[in-house]
Image: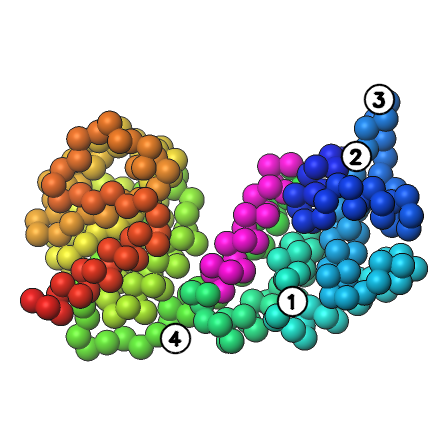
Amino acid sequence: MVVYSIKDIEKLSGVKAHTLRIWEKRYNLVNPRRTKTNIRYYTDEDLRHILNVCFLYRRGYKISKIAKMDKETLKQEVSSHSKLDLSFEDQIDALLLFVMELDSYNFNQILDQHISQKGMEETMSSVIYPVLDKLSMAWLAGSFTYVHEAFVIQIIKSKILASIEALDDLADYSNKYVIYLADQEQQELSLLFFHYLLKKNGNRVINLGTGINLSDVGFSINAVQPDYVFTIINEGNTSIPLENYTEQISGQLGDATLLLTGYHVIASDHLNWPDNVVRLSSLMEALNFVNDAKNKRKAS
C-alpha cells in the first residue's frame, strides 16, 4: 500500500498542512492513519478524497457543506463542474483525479476545451506541463504506475499529433529540420511539441521518431539535406560518450547545424563542442533560436 505524509498531501493538493489538520478535527473530512510513533499518514483513497474536497472548496462550496456529502455525491459534483468552466484554478487537481481513476472521458473534456479556446501552445504551458509536474511527484511517491503514465502519455500524444496534422503544409518553408530521439531517451512529448512549434512557425519537419541510431541520423542528413538537426539528450545513455556522439554527427552535417538540448547536454560544460553544434538550455530557448533563424532567412 502506498502512503503519504501530510507534507506529501500538501504538495499534491496545494492545501497547507495546518488547514488539513483543521479540516480533520473540525469537519472529520478525512481520518488519516497513524504510525506507532503517532505520525499521520494517508492512503491513495485519502488523497483522492482530499483532491475532490479541494476542487469544490476552491469553486466556492462551503467546507461544512462538502463535509456532509458522501463520496459518490462528492465525485458527481466534481465531474459536473469539470466540464463547465475553464476559468477556475482547479483543473490541474481535476486532471490528477481523472488520471487516478483512468477517466479518459473527463480528461479529454478538459484538454479539448483548453485546446479549442487557447490553442495547443498555451495548453501545453498552462495545463499539460503543470499536470506532468504534479504527476511526477506522485510517481516518485509510488502512487502512480506504468498504466497511469501510459494513459496520460497516449492522450496528450494524440492531442499534439492532431494539432500538428491540423496545421497547413506550406509551399515555401523557412527551414528544414530533422528531429529525433536517440536510444533510451524518453522525451517523446517534448519532441512532438517541438515538431508542432516548428511547423506552426512555417518550417518543414522530418520527425524520425524515437530510438534512432547514429547511422540512421547520418542517412537522413544525406537524404534530406536539412538546415538543422535537433535532438534532446536527458539520459546520456547513448552507446558512446556524448562528446564522441556529437562529433560523429557533426562530421556528417555538411552545411547543417546540430541543435542539442536536455539535462545531459546542459550539464556537460566541460566538453569541447564543434562549431556547427549549438547547445540550448530549454525547449523555449530552442524555439527562440528557430525564430531567429527564420528571420535571418527572410532577411537574406
Residue 21 lies, with reference to residue 194, above or below; the image says above
Q: Quadrant of residue 59?
A: bottom right
Q: Judging from the image, what secondary structure is the residue with disc 2 in? A: strand
Q: Is residue 133 magenta?
A: yes
State the quadrant of the N terminus: top right
Residue 218 located left or right of residue 61:
left
Where is residue 14 drawn, in percent x and y?
A: 67, 49
Give the Cα separation between the discs numbered 4 and 1.
Answer: 28 Å
Sooner in the amino-acid sequence: mark 4 or mark 3: 3
Q: Is residue 206 above or below residue 1?
A: below
Q: Which residue is mark 1?
A: 88
Task: Read off the residue under disc 3.
Answer: 37
Q: What's the distance in space between the residues labelled 4 and 3, CA to CA? A: 58 Å
For the residues bearing labels 1 and 3, Cβ distance under 8 angstroms: no
Q: Secondary structure at mark 3?
A: loop
Check disc 4 and give the amino acid type: Ala
